[in-house]
Image: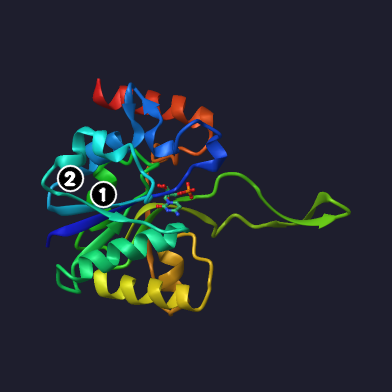
Amino acid sequence: KDYWVIVPAAGIGRRMGADRPKQYLPLLGRPLLSLTLRNILGWSGLAGVVVSLSEQDTYFSHLKEANHPLVHRVIGGAERADSVLSALDFLAQRVSGDTPVLVHDAARPCVSERDIYALLSDNVSSMALLARPACDTIKQSHRVGGETYVEKTVSRENIWLAQTPQRAPLNTLHSCLGKAMEQGVAVTDEASALELFGHSLQLVTGDSDNIKVTHPADIVIAETILRLRYS
Ligand code: C5P
């Protein structure tokens, strides 16, 4: 069945400390969001992409992909979840409630097609996400007098780091994310909104190449991954 992709791209990228939102920083001479969209537009079975943008966005309309017939835009919100909800509102007016939706960070231009097809495979649950098993030792902390100390070491045996895309049927994601926000729960990904209402999500092991461009060094890493892939 055909699926839609939502790309939240309404953030300001504070941690990057650059002169523009991080989704527009150049990678291999092209804006990050442009590379992410180019990647998505190559996936087979794609019905369309909804990009959530800041109301003040002045960059998007200059992207090569801005006028692609499968690319739609909506105005995002203050938090990532508001931006995703706004795209879900858009889709709920247009496509049936059981349509599979993948939510994918603008900041993850390197996800491989192989991982996308693994996530969309018939053998995988309709609610699922790409993730990596934690490989560092995990410390839980507490603060004393302004300093940070180890509270305890958390076994990493069952710890996974969530990536995107995250997949769910449109109506389920729309209602869970809407209710989570009404209740004022801070959700930093789509899976957590689904978990909150008792849904079981399958973890699909993603590639370590699927990095989230967050800090300046990540730009160089992403460029290297993409150069190797597209050369
Ligand atoms: O800041 P962070 O890296 O967690 O953002 C993840 C994604 O969510 C980015 O693609 C960012 O543009 C998007 N976002 C958004 N609306 C916000 C905040 C973040 O679409 N209000």
Q: Amino acid at mark 1?
A: Ile
As rendered, which of 201 and 99 lies closer to the eye?
Answer: 99
**139 left or right, relative to 144:** left
* Rendered location of residue 155, percent (x, y): 64, 57
Q: Is residue 227 above or below residue 127?
A: above
How far apart, in angstroms, are the residues tagged by discs 2 and 1?
Answer: 8 Å
Assign the C terminus to one quadrant of the image. Answer: top left
* Rendered location of residue 94, percent (x, y): 15, 68
As rendered, which of 81 and 213 lies closer to the eye?
Answer: 81
Residue at image location 57% in from the left, 57% down from the top: 157
**8 left or right, relative to 221:** left
Residue at image location 47% in from the left, 44% down from the top: 12
* Rendered location of residue 62, percent (x, y): 25, 33
Dot 2 or dot 1: first in sequence order is: 2
* Rendered location of residue 146, percent (x, y): 84, 51
Pointer 2 local density, CA inside 10 Å: few below 14, some 14–19, many at least 20: some
Q: Which mark is residue 116?
A: 1
Q: Amino acid at mark 2?
A: Trp
**215 left or right, relative to 81:** right
Pointer 1 local density, CA inside 10 Å: few below 14, some 14–19, many at least 20: many
Evaluate whether residue 56 shows in this view.
yes
- When asked about the image quadrant of residue 126, the answer is bottom left
Q: How is the image coloured?
A: rainbow
**SS under mark 1:** helix
Assign the N terminus to one quadrant of the image. Answer: bottom left
The answer to whether the residues at label 2 and label 1 have Cβ atoms under 8 Å apart is yes
What residue does disc 2 label?
Answer: 43
Residue at image location 53% in from the left, 36% down from the top: 16
